[in-house]
Amino acid sequence: MRIRDQFIRDENQRSGIHTEEIEINDLPPMVRATVQARDFLTTVSELTGAHGIHLSVKGQLFEGGNKPPPGVKRLHLLCEAQSRQDAINAAREIRRNIEEVV
């Protein structure tokens, strides 16, 4: 799994795409629903002031401390941006908003 993730990360960087992941699997259901909402994702893009940020929900939900099978990732947000700093800023803003809600 890690080799594949590293390969994808390297390919994305070669093509000018930088990524950050924020795990949301263990958040309370209401918080997960909030951060997955289109309005929230749009607001984060606007607050960071960066253009070309793409936020998407990836992975599977594993409740009750269940571990995912090999090759499967837990539920997370994926931030993709044209610069490393934009991806980091978007992830930081998402984490800040999550802390406010929790």
Image (tube, rainbow, N blue to C red):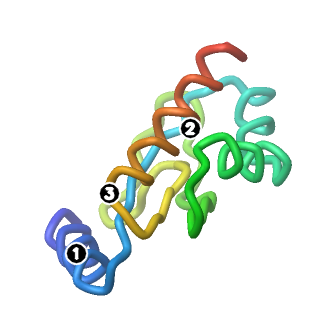
Instruction: Find residue 101 and report its image quarter.
Output: top right
Q: Which residue is found at the position 42% from the left and 56% from the top?
A: 73
Label 2 Cα crowd, 10 Å radius (few <14 / some 14-19 / many 20+): many
Question: In 3D space, how far apart are the residues under numbered discs 2 and 1 (Cα atoms)?
Answer: 21 Å
Residue 2 lies, in percent from the top left, at 18, 63
The image position of residue 16, as x and y in percent, is 33, 79
Q: Which residue is labeled 1 in the image?
A: 4
Q: CA distance from mark 3 to mark 1?
A: 20 Å
Q: Which mark is residue 84?
A: 3
Left or right, residue 70 beside residue 23: left
Task: List the single residue furthest toward the left.
Answer: 3
- Residue contact at pointers 2 and 3, CB within 8 angstroms: no
Q: Secondary structure at mark 2?
A: loop
Mark closest to the chain's N terminus, 3 or 1:
1
Q: Is residue 92 left or right of residue 48?
A: left
Determine which residue is flagged by label 2: 24
* Three-letter amino acid code at the position of disc 2: Ile
The amino acid type found where label 1 is placed reads: Arg
Label 3 neighbour load within 10 Å: few <14, some 14-19, many 20+: some
- Residue 43 in picture, x, y percent from top left: 76, 44
Element type at mark 3: helix
Q: CA distance from mark 2 to mark 3?
A: 21 Å
Picture coordinates of residue 60 (x, y %)? 57, 56
Residue at screen point 56% across, 38% down: 24
Question: Secondary structure beneath disc 1?
Answer: helix
Task: Name the quarter where the C terminus is drawn.
Answer: top right
Q: Which mark is residue 58?
A: none
Amino acid type, callout 3: Arg
